[in-house]
Image: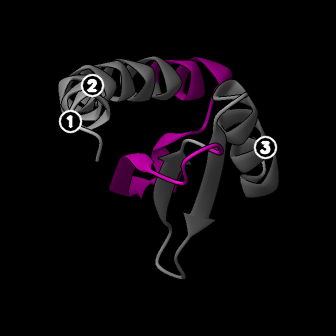
């Protein structure tokens, strides 16, 4: 079994150079926050991940892949609003 500290380190490292912070609740639920360090904008927040389900490197890898996909979708969704704000002087 992989320790929770190691799971956190693997997930947080997977999103560099973005800032990623994983927290584990007393009930064993993992929350992942991914933010853009330059702007501080939260690009992804996922809660309720069962830490017990992350019992192998494959399970962690699958989670990271799923989170990266969600992050990519969120960033694409936010990008047009950012461009509009820059063009209008906001």
Name the side, left or right, on which 88 lies relative to 59.
left
The reply to whether the C-beta atoms of the residues labelled 3 and 2 are less than 8 Å apart is no
Q: Which residue is mark 3?
A: 9
Mark 2 and mark 1: span between their CA atoms? 9 Å
Mark 3 and mark 2: span between their CA atoms? 33 Å
Which one is in front in this view, the residue at disc 1 or the one at disc 3?
A: 1
**Residue 54 visible in the current orientation:** yes
Q: Which mark is residue 1?
A: none
Q: Secondary structure at mark 3?
A: helix
88 versus 20 height, above or below:
above
**Residue 1 visible in the current orientation:** no
Q: Is residue 60 magenta?
A: yes
The quadrant in which the N terminus is found is top right
Q: Position of residue 80 (x, y in %)?
A: 19, 23
Query: Does label 3 or label 2 sit earlier along the sequence?
Result: 3
Name the side, left or right, on which 69 lies relative to 87.
right
Query: Does label 1 or label 3 sit earlier along the sequence?
Result: 3
Q: Which residue is mark 1?
A: 88
For image coordinates 19% across by 29% down, the residue present is 84
The reply to whether the C-beta atoms of the residues labelled 1 and 3 are less than 8 Å apart is no
Q: Which residue is mark 2?
A: 83
Label 2: how many Cα within 10 Å (few below 14, some 14–19, many 20+)? few
For image coordinates 63% across by 46% down, the residue present is 20
Q: Which residues are magenta?
A: 37-62
Which one is in front in this view, the residue at disc 2 or the one at disc 1?
A: 1
Q: Position of residue 58 (x, y in %)?
A: 58, 17
Which one is in front in this view, the residue at disc 3 or the one at disc 2?
A: 2
Query: Does label 2 or label 1 sit earlier along the sequence?
Result: 2
Label 1: how many Cα within 10 Å (few below 14, some 14–19, many 20+)? few
Q: Secondary structure at mark 1?
A: loop
Q: Secondary structure at mark 2?
A: helix
For residue 76, which quarter of the picture?
A: top left
């Amino acid at each position: 079994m992989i320790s929770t500290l190691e799971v956190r380190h693997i997930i947080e490292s997977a999103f560099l150079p973005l800032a990623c912070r994983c927290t584990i609740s007393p009930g064993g639920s993992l929350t992942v926050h991914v933010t853009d360090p330059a702007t501080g904008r939260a690009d992804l927040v996922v809660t309720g991940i069962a830490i017990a389900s992350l019992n192998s490197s494959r399970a962690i890898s699958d989670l990271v892949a799923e989170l990266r996909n969600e992050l990519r979708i969120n960033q694409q969704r936010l990008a047009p609003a950012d461009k509009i704000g820059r063009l209008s002087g906001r």
